Image (cartoon, helix red, strand yellow):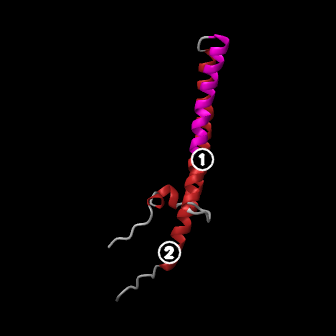
Amino acid sequence: MRETGPIFVSGPLLMNHPDDRSALAVAAARASHVTTIAMEMALPTLLGHWIDRRLNTGFVFLLLGAVSGIVLGMWHLLQFARQLNTQTPKAANRHATRTATTKTPDKDVE
């Protein structure tokens, strides 16, 4: 019978964390990052819409808020992706080193 762990541990992004935190702690941190990025994209747009309604300026501040929110959110998203990209090889190297030390070399038969 095949043993399976909890569902939140099965994803590759959760298993390749280089620190000693639990998978749940890593998932919570990454969910927090993603939520922050979403808010960075949405809040400037909503603020621009609110300013436009208060000043009766059409959609000028809405567009400024949307553009600035998208730029800020994408910049933060790229930083987050780079951070994940630099963490993953460390975990993969650690796994490869651990696997290489446990394998026994094949002996040639003459």
Q: Tell me: residue 74, above or below residue 4.
A: above
List the residue tagged with mark 2.
Answer: 100
Residue closer to the observer: 84 or 105: 84
Q: Secondary structure at mark 2?
A: helix
Is 93 inside the magenta-drawn segment?
no
Identity of the residue furthest to the bottom in this view: 110
| Image position of 44 (left or right of 102) | right
Q: How many marks?
A: 2
Q: Which residues are magenta?
A: 34-57
Residue closer to the observer: 3 or 17: 3
Q: Residue at x 62, y 40 (%)?
A: 76
Horizontal and vertical percent for residue 70?
58, 30
Main secondary structure found in the magenta portion = helix
Residue 32's tag is 1
Q: Tell me: residue 82, above or below residue 98.
A: above
Choose top left, top right, bottom left or bottom right for residue 93. bottom right
Q: Is residue 67 visible?
A: no
Horizontal and vertical percent for residue 80?
60, 46
Label 2, label 1: how many angstroms apart (C-alpha)? 35 Å
Identity of the residue furthest to the left in this view: 1
Q: Tell me: residue 67, above or below residue 53.
A: below
Quadrant in which the C terminus appears: bottom left
Q: Earlier in the sequence, mark 2 or mark 1?
A: 1
**Amino acid at pointer 1:** Ser
Residue closer to the observer: 42 or 82: 42
Q: Secondary structure at mark 1?
A: helix
